[in-house]
Amino acid sequence: QVQLVDSGGGFVQAGGSLRLSCKASRRIIFNNFVMGWFRQAPGKEREFVAGEVWNGGGEYADSVKGRFTISRDNAKITVNLQMKSLKPEDTAIYYCAAKRSFVAPNYDYWGQGTQVTVSS
């Protein structure tokens, strides 16, 4: 079983920045899996935020393009989400996730979530 542990959430004022991290329990799985980030706000369904793509870059939800950046550190078996210019509507529980390939439709493993709260 692969475990993902999210961290880095917290309280920040609008316009501020946060960096979320997700550490995987198994290096081999992490190195071969595709990583992504999702979020779920109160009363809302979980939504896609950012994900790795085949060319080493990232794809992003329209609501976060230009503000969020996904990256990985294989040595630390960690994927990060750098969030800038945060808005109150970014408030949510953020989850990291992993899937087996770029063409896989579903993410198979999920972190426990980390709370991000952005005040106006």
Image (tube, rainbow, N blue to C red):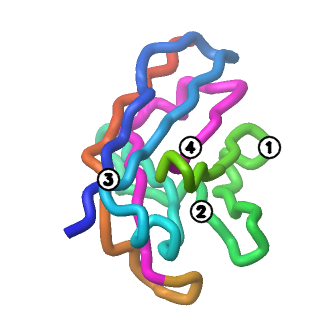
In 3D space, how far apart are the residues under numbered discs 2 and 4 (Cα atoms)?
A: 11 Å
In 3D space, how far apart are the residues under numbered discs 4 and 1 (Cα atoms)?
A: 16 Å
Circle 4 Cα neighbour tier, 10 Å, few/some/many (<14 / 14–19 / ≥20) = many
84 part of magenta stretch: yes
Residue at the (71%, 25%) spot, across then down: 85
Contact check, label 2 and label 3, Cβ < 8 Å: no
Residue that label 2 marks: 51
Q: Earlier in the sequence, mark 2 or mark 3?
A: 3
Magenta-colored span: 78-100
Task: Indicate the amino acid at tag 2.
Answer: Gly
Residue at the (37%, 54%) spot, across then down: 24
Circle 2 sits in a helix, a strand or a loop, which is it? strand
Q: Earlier in the sequence, mark 4 or mark 3?
A: 3
Left or right of 98 in this view: 81: right
Residue that label 4 marks: 80
Residue that label 3 marks: 4
Judge by depth and name the residue closer to the eye, 9 or 28.
28
